């Protein structure tokens, strides 16, 4: 089973690399503001986890500079995740807002949160 996981993990990472999405282009000032807002976010992940890849691809598509922590390869990150979030489950987004910290675990929930907060508003046609 370990060999199968290793092969699948390598395939996931390969296809993620081959089909990396392009990030959206924002005005430099707007992107700087987004970068400031994302400084209070951190993603705890495993490199080859398909759900983690899904979240990282969403981050890339939306040009979000969110700090990432590999909870599989780093004891410090794993301990932070366990102490803060209460469980060793990835992906997990650490959100710090107004001095309070929330831990969000589900990939769909994380993607919805990021897109609702940072996706560019489409320009509307003039009437």
Image (cartoon, grey):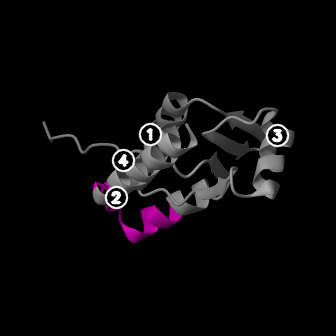
Q: Are marks 1 and 2 in contact (CB under 8 Å)?
A: no
Give the spatial CA distance, label 1 vs label 2. Answer: 13 Å
Mark in front: 1 vs 4: 1
Of 107 and 72, the residue lying toward us: 72
Residue shown at 70% from the left, 50% from the top: 71
Residue at the disc numbered 2: 23
Residue at the disc numbered 3: 82
Of 119 and 79, the residue lying toward us: 79
Picture quadrant where residue 85 is located: top right
Residue 49 can be seen in this image: no
Mark found first going from the N terminus, 1 or 4? 1
Q: Tell me, yes or no, whether the highlighted magenta stretch contains residue 105.
A: no
Q: Taking 109 as reference, is 73 left or right? A: right
Residue at the disc numbered 1: 115
Mark found first going from the N terminus, 1 or 2? 2
Mark 2 residue element: loop
Mark 1 residue element: helix
Give how far across and how far down residue 68 sits, in percent. 62, 56
Give the spatial CA distance, label 1 vs label 4. Answer: 8 Å
């Amino acid at each position: 089973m370990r060999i199968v996981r290793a092969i699948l993990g390598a395939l996931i990472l390969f296809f993620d690399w081959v089909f990396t999405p392009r990030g959206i282009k924002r005005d430099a000032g707007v992107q700087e503001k987004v970068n400031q807002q994302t400084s209070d976010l951190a993603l705890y992940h495993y490199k080859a986890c398909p759900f983690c890849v899904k979240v990282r691809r969403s981050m890339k598509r939306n040009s979000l500079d969110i700090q990432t922590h590999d909870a599989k390869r780093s004891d410090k990150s794993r301990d932070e995740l366990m102490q803060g979030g209460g469980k060793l489950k990835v992906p997990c987004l650490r959100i710090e807002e107004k001095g309070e910290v929330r831990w969000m675990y589900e990939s769909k929930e994380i993607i919805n949160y990021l897109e609702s907060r940072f996706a560019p508003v489409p320009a509307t046609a003039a009437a």
